[in-house]
Each structure stands twice: as C-alpha cells, then as structure tokens.
Amino acid sequence: MIRAVSSARSRTIATVLLLAVCGAVSCGGEQGENVTPLNSGGTMIVVQPEEPTTLFPPLLTSSAGLGIVNGIFDRLAEIGPELNVSGDRGFTPRLASAWQWASDSLSIAFTLDDKARWHDGAPVRADDVRFTFGVYTADVIGSDLKSVLGNIDSVSVRDSVTAVFWFKRRMPHQFFEATYHMYILPSHLLASIGMDKLTDAPFATAPVGTGRFRFASWERGVRLDVIADTANARGRANLDRVIWSFVKDYGTATVKLFAGEADFYEAIRPENIPEAARSTNLRLQPAPTLQYGLLVFNLGARGDSTVPNPIFSDVRVRRALAMALDRVKMARNVFDTLGAVSLAAAPRALIPDTVALRQLPYDPVAARALLDSAGWVLAAGDSVRTRDGVRLTFEVLAPQSSLARQRYATLLQEQLRGVGVEVRTRIMAGPAIGAQVMALNFDAFVWVWGSTPGRLGMVQTWGSRGSQNMGAYRSRAFDALLDSALVAFDDAESKRLWTATLQQLIDDQPAIFLYEPQTPVAVHKRIRTAPLRPDAWYANLADWSIDPAQRIDRDRIGLGGPR
Amino acid sequence: MFVAASAAFALLHAAPGDPYSDLDRYQFMSADVREAQRARRGLDLPLRQQYARWIGSLVRGDLGWSTLEQRAVRDVIRDALPRTVGLMTLALIGSLVIGIAIGAWQGTRTGSVGDRMLSLLAMLLYSIPEFALAATLMLLLTPWLLPVGGIMTEGFEQLAWPARAWNVAQHLVLPWLSLSLIGAAVVARYQRSATRDVFRQPFIQTARAKGLGVGAVRWHAMRASLLPVIALTGMLFPSLLTGAVFVEQIFNWPGMGLQLLRGLDQHDYDLVTSLVLGIAALTILGSLIADLLRDLADPRVRSAVRAD
C-alpha cells in the first residue's frame, strides 16, 4: 500500500516535472508564438565578396541576395534535402499548411497557415499568392524566373486562405514549379505601387516578409543586418542577428575570417584551406553544391550559329579533345582533394545513376587517331595539326575573377598541345566574356554552371531552343530524350530516361565536363549549423544556433532595433 | 571635369560588354529579359544617343541610375563622398605633418646618418605602390592590433559614444597610414630640399647675424620653406585620390574609390562616369585650395596682387 502511494506520488511528481520541462521548451504546444528557444541568441557574421543589388525576390538569382531573402521571405512549401522535384514528395509546409491536388492533377489548392503574418503584423492572404505570381510573370518586372513558370496558367483565390494554382499541362514537377521559385510577396504593401515602379520602390531595399528573420538595416557597401522575428508563427530564428558583411576583395575577406571578425565564409579558396584547417577558431564543413565546371564549345561559326564551326561541328574532334584530357589529374592539380571530375551535364547530386554513365576514357593515342580520321593530321616537323591548310588552333576564354578557371585554361592548353592542338588562353573580365559569348564570337570558354534541382534547367542550357544554350548545340535525339525524361512519372522510367539524356551529351560532347568543386565552407566553431542543402546552404539558417557556453562579445549584441 | 567624364564615358563604352553581360552574375537571365533590361536603361540606343541622353541628364542635375546598386547614382555618391573626403583630408594632413616634420629635420642636418637613413626610407616608401604597402600593413598589424577593414565593427550601434569614436579611429588607422606614409615620403623630400635651400638664403644669414636664437631662425626658415610644399599639396591631392582607390578596396573602406572599382568591374556606366566627374571636381578643388594657400602664405604673391 505504502509502495503503491509512493509510486503514485512519484508518478505525479514526474508528470509535473515533465509538464514543467515541456512548458519550458514548448514541446507539444504551438511552436513559436513568442516562445524563446533555450539555445536562441547570438550574432553570426557572414562575409561575402558580392553584395546584392536588390532584395526584391523576383530579381534575385545569385546566392549573394538569395541567402538574405531566403531568411526574410517564405515559399509556400520547402523542397526536401533529397531535392526531389517529382510530385510533392519530400516537400514540407511553409506558408502553406496543407495542399490538395485536383483529381486531374491540373490544379493544386494551397491552404495558407492562418497564423502566418507579415513582419508588419498583417495576415498572409491568398491574394498575396496571386499577386506574387503576377509580379514574377510580368514582362515589366523582367524576372529571370518567368521562363521557368511557363507551365503555370494562372493562380486564383478560392477564399482568403486558399490559393489555387492552375497548370497548362500535367507534369511530374508541377508542385516544384509552384513552390520553389517564388517567395510570396505582400500585396497589401505593393499592389498600390505601379508594376513598372516595383523594382525601384523602397521595398526593394527594405523588404517586409514572413520569414523567421526580418530585415533590420542595410548600409550599402558595408553590411546588411537581419534579426530574428520573435513573433513568427513558425518560431523565432535561433540566432538573434545575422550580419552580412560585404568585402569585395577576396583576400581581405579571408583575413577578416581568420582574424575572427567573421563567422562564415562560403567562398573560401582552395589555397586558404590549409590555414583554415589549422585555425583554432574555425572548422571546415563539407558543403555540397550543384555546380559543375565545363569547357563550352561554340558549335557554330564565330558570329553566325547557322554556319557550322570548322573545328567543333565535327563530333569526332570534340570527342578526341575530351579523350586527350586527363581530367582526373587536372582536378587534382587545381583542387587537390577539393574537387572531382564532372561526370556529365549535371552535378553528382542530380545524376540518378552515376554508375550507368559511360565516360569517354583518357586515351591520347585514341584521341590522335580520331583527329587523324577527322582529317586533322600532323605534318612531319610540325607541332600543330592542319586540315586543308587550316591549323587546329582555337581560343579558350576564362574570367579574371576565377583562379580555378584560369588554371584549367592553362592545363587545357598544355594537355592539348600533346595531341597537336594549339590553344590560346585569354583571361578577360566577366562582362567582356559575356559580350563575346552572347554574340557567339568565341571558340570555347571555361564556365561554371549552377544547376537547379531536377535538372530542369537543361532545357535552357542544352535544348535546341534553350535561351542559355551558349554553344548552339542542336540535337534532335537529345531534345527527344529530354522531353521524354521531363514528363516521365514512373521513377524507374524517369531514371532510365535521365540517364539516356545525360549519356547523349557525353557521347556528343558539346562541352567537356571538367570538374565539380567540393570546396568546404569555413564556419566559426561556436556555430552549430543545420544540414547544408546543396542548392542553398542558407536554406535552414533560422535553425542554426550558437553554443551558449562559447559565446563571444558580439553574441551579446542582441536584437536591438532597426538602426 | 567634363572632358574627364566624357573620356570615361567613351572608354567604358568602348570596352566589350555592358552591365548585363556578366554570365556569372546573370547566369539565369534569359536573352529576352536581358534585352528588356538594356532597353529600360537606354543601353540599346546608338552610342551617340546615349551620350546625348547622358549630357542632357547631367545638365538637369541627374547623375543617372546605378545598375550595380539599383539606386540613383546621387544616392551612391552621397554615401561614398563623405567617407572618401574624410579619409583624404586626414591623409593629407597626415602626409603634410609627418612629411614636413621629417623633411625639416633632415634639411637642417643634411648629410648626417639620420638624414641618409630617412632619405632611404622615404625613397622606399615613395617607390612602393599603395596597394602593396596597404597589404603589408594589413599583414603586420591585423588582427592583433587593429581591425582588418570596414569603417566600424559589428555591434557598433550598441557602443557608447567614446567607444564608438575609438572604434572608428581604430578602423581609420590602416587606410590612413597607407595613404599618409606615401604622401609623407613625397612631402619630406620636397621639404628637405626646400629647408636646405632656405638655410643658404641671405635673410637667414642676416637673422643669425642679428643674434636671433636657433629656434627663431628655424621658424623663419620653416615659413619660407613651406611655399614649395604648399604648391605640392595641389599635386598631392590627385595622387592621394588615386591611391585611395586601391587602399579603399584592400581595407573595404566604402568610399568613392571602392565604388569606382566595383563600377568598372560591372560596367556600371552612370556610376563610373559620375565618380570620375566627382574625382575630377575634388582634384580641381584641391588645386584651387593649394593656390589660395600659396597666395596667403607667400608675401611676394600678396604684394603682387595688391600692386595689380
């Protein structure tokens, strides 16, 4: 009896204690709503060389601005860590708390979280979603993302918290299209401004969003502050403040990091990695990306894509050039262990079956034979091949902003010399290269392409009518495979078709796929990061925290107020 | 000013590319959107028309639109100008004070070991490019002694006023020192030579013969030897401005020099031409001030003006 009473009392005490603990950490209750997590607080300084020009989401494509905007604004739903784009598998709610597919799959109704609020306190409404779609697709706005929203016919408002996306065609990646590209904008603040004035409106530099961070201040050329939105329906961000410190000079940015004046640097260069590894304050964290480097050939004549290029229009020549390159050694030379050979026109994270892809081997002997068979022969005593009196020589452009690409250009020059091909390297400013490439006035250039989840960007980069098909690659076989891959609903079939699509590019070699950078990011040791998503390291920034036991002076800055 | 800005306009447009042609920056921008943006900023017009539009805007006081900063150029300059002018003024004062002091000391002790050592040091500093000196100072003095760059530390707004002033001063030291040391080397060479020459002048001999003390003689000599240095100040100003372009980049000092480099990098036409205009104006202003100071300091010029 005594034991039973004692046991009951123990259970009661345990229950009270459990409830107390649950109350303290808000377990089981409404998440957020002015509850301060136990590990909240602290300031993180992100140093980055590039400063965004605007914080207006439709105009942002570079990671410089997206990292900031991603904290301030929300999408309807967030893609999962596997970056699946087929259906809604892996997606988690954000502004939308639920969604429902129509029976014919041609529309999706998103129900908005009724607790979601703009940072000025106004509730988020379905009208905001409709307005956002209108902004992203307006010609006058000039968003790069308009082209990837082409399958969305319209967005309608069913009631104040339900927005319905209507699609033109049933596709596996409809849900991705509706949710991934657009950050929802506040119509109550922007609708009264003319569409043609939106991009220059004050909102573009001092935005109001719904994210777990809110905009605090922006001192141009110096820094931009965001602070935790303590009233956010999804819970306040763990960090009090994130300061984006803009340092144009890479060297100075690196010194700032080593000096302890910054906590996070995404663009740390391979040559600084050993010093970062020795630092007692920093740790290097693997950061997968969706980038790959390639040598793009111009398959059309210089300045006229309708005329075949005298060198690169022959697939045998392109394959021979690829086979003459020891890409493994090149990657080792430039990146050491911080880079790998690119397998195809997509990073490994987006290749459904890396083993199934047949690579062209490194075989200089076969490369020479292939060039011979294409008519490019090496005369006795000559070091450069010729055909009908024309020398096998071409120019490779590389940007002055990228040491890695410059080194690749030099290595290409050296390795191709071995098979009788003369390469002239030309280092130029980014805008100058762009001007030549857009005018198709180039032979080849070393470039880095940032892929989007689902490889959907391949339509633009390699499709015959793709607006970013810089090398003028045209292949009906590839177009057909890509079209089929894009509409394959069955997982196995999709995998097979995507493998065939990528293999077609390997076989055709419209570009030589050179490398995938695997450079880590440098993070201050006191910072606990959430998993870094390959498409956006900043995706879960609101979940990052700072170990209370290791806090330093700047962690006590707190939320303060907008300056 | 107009010629300098027009030359900048022509040279910038002659370079291949435009604000929207950087493939790394605008990787996902479609050709349609790119053309729309160009049309919006008038970049699709023939160069002659662009120039006419630019001149027209300038006459109306409109400096144009920064494609890099996505805001009016006047706002960009409004932010950057005080930072550069402040840094330049302090650097100029530093150059003059340090240079005159060292040069005057050398001028009275020509041929001594100290004079030779300082001459060597001045020559060394004079021959080092600003960016190399700035990078060396950064490596030597940061992070243990001074902050790496910027104009203030994070959390600045939480500091009390004395701490804020101290914080700004700390950030100023390295860019100021980088510019001042090179300026001081130039000034010291002129001052040394001028002091040495003045001490050979008859009026100094007369002053000594009259029994004036060493201090009083040096004071007279100093005043007379300042004239060439004052004239030099007019030339020093543009030289310091050029140096500021590189120093601002290395120390991330968000002034006109840093904006100029960013603008050049991204072909921000309106920003670069306006900054060139501003820098030309500052150069002319510097020369004007130097002329006025020389007129004030030189009694011969004053009397000539009066005689006219």
Image (cartoon, coloured by chain):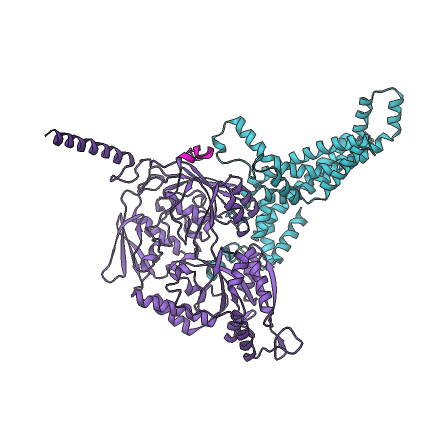
Name the outermost residue toward the left.
Answer: A1
**Coordinates of residue A558 in the picture (x, y in percent):** 42, 33
Quadrant for the N terminus of chain A in the image: top left
Q: Does residue B265 appear left or right of residue B290 in this picture?
A: left
Q: Residue at x 33, y 66 (%)?
A: A494
**Coordinates of residue A26 in the picture (x, y in percent):** 27, 37
Q: Does residue A481 appear left or right of residue B174 in this picture?
A: left
Q: Please identify which colour was used for chain B in the image.
A: cyan
Q: Please identify which colour was used for chain A in the image.
A: purple
Can residue B26 be spotted in the picture? no
Q: Out of A480 and B42, give the one closest to the viewer.
A: A480
Q: Is residue A551 magenta?
A: yes
Main SS of the magenta segment?
helix
Q: Does residue A281 appear left or right of residue B289 in this picture?
A: left
Can residue B116 be spotted in the picture? yes
**Coordinates of residue B136 in the picture (x, y in percent):** 64, 42
Q: Residue at x 37, y 37 (%)?
A: A40
Q: Residue at x 37, y 40 (%)?
A: A237
Q: Residue at x 49, y 29 (%)?
A: B159
Q: Does residue B190 appear left or right of residue B167 in this picture?
A: right
Q: Out of A75 and A501, give the one closest to the viewer.
A: A501
Asked which quadrant contains residue B241, the reply is top right
Q: Which stretch appears magenta?
A: A549-558
Tell me if residue B134 comes above or below residue A415 in the rendering: above
Q: Is residue A244 magenta?
A: no
Q: Out of B127 and B59, give the one closest to the viewer.
A: B127
Count of numbered circles on the image: 0
**Coordinates of residue A142 in the picture (x, y in percent):** 44, 56
